[in-house]
Amino acid sequence: MAQMDKSTRNVMMDMPIVDARVVEFLRDGQRQLIGELRNIQLYAFERKMPIIPHETAKFLQFLMSVLAPKRVLEVGTAIGFSAGLMALSAPDANITTIDRYGLMIERAKENFKKLGVLDRVTLLEGDAENLLPEMLENDCSRFDFIFLDCAKSKYIEFLPLCLKLLSSDGAIMIDDIFQGGTIFDDESEVRHNRRKIYEGLNALLREVNARTDLISTALPLGDGVLLIKKSGLTG
Ligand SMILES: C[S@@+](CC[C@H](N)C(=O)[O-])C[C@H]1O[C@@H](n2cnc3c(N)ncnc32)[C@H](O)[C@@H]1O
């Protein structure tokens, strides 16, 4: 194959995408949230609580407004920021959100009240490891959007359950898939206490890439976002 002439090569292709100025724009240059949602976001930022960063919040807000889902499932409520944002951005949606951490759950309940979305948000308290199979056993109706933002090593375990809980044209969004890029480190460099996350996230990306019955795309938003949809094709 002929070498590409250097003068015609798109030099931008070799540059890192997320340079600091781009991240600064995504976080500070894009229009900020307003009202109670902004207060909850600031409360979390000030206390370094683990909520999605602003660029991911903007993306999720946009996605909700385009997809207009009716039934949403979230794993990883924390203080209810992303669930509240989804409820406000998709006014016809009923949201089921799961968390196992009592302190977060209490704060989330207060926040859903402040946001005026208590009637559309169901907070399930417990480990998703038990609750997701229970939902399947009880044959709960399917969700048209599922947001996974919980223990990162568990994504690979939760994926098959979530695919069963997903409607045929629904979408799954998974947050924090890159771990600051460390999932691409050589295995020998990974510290013992990070190994489960490293292996789990690598297994997730391999699985999703290998399956022709799924369409997926990874985005460098925040610490990485993975979007998955059933392709409708088998094999
Ligand atoms: C990153 S925070 C979620 C942030 C939230 N989605 C937001 O952006 O506002 C992760 C939450 O997942 C919860 N979590 C982690 N693993 C879980 C599991 N297996 N079952 C239920 N909750 C889990 C933690 O207690 C924590 O509150």
Image: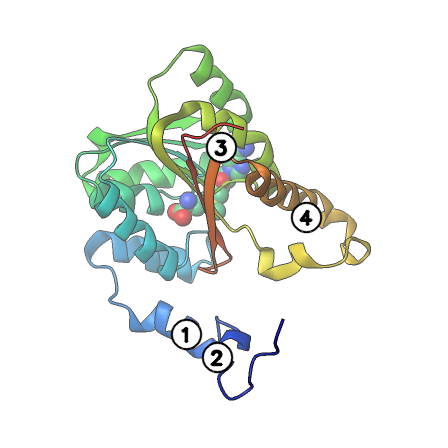
Amino acid type, callout 1: Val
- In this rendering, the answer to whether 169 lies above or below 197 is above
Sequence-wise, which precedes: disc 1 or disc 4? 1
**In the displayed structure, would residue 222 be above or below residue 29?**
above
The residue indicated by pointer 3 is 213
Q: Is residue 127 visible?
A: no
- The outermost residue toward the bottom is 7
Could you say where residue 74 lies in the image, as x and y percent from the top left? 39, 35
C-alpha span from label 1 to label 2: 19 Å
**Which is nearer the N-term, disc 1 or disc 3?**
1
Question: Hey, what amino acid is under mark 2?
Answer: Asn
- Rendered image quadrant of residue 84: top left
Question: Could you say where residue 168 lies in the image, as x and y percent from the top left?
Answer: 36, 27
- The dot on residue 198 is 4
The numbered mark at residue 22 is: 1
Give yes or no for contact between labels 4 and 2 (Cβ–Cβ under 8 Å): no
Hey, which residue is sitting farthest right in the picture? Answer: 188
Where is residue 11? Give x, y as percent.
51, 81
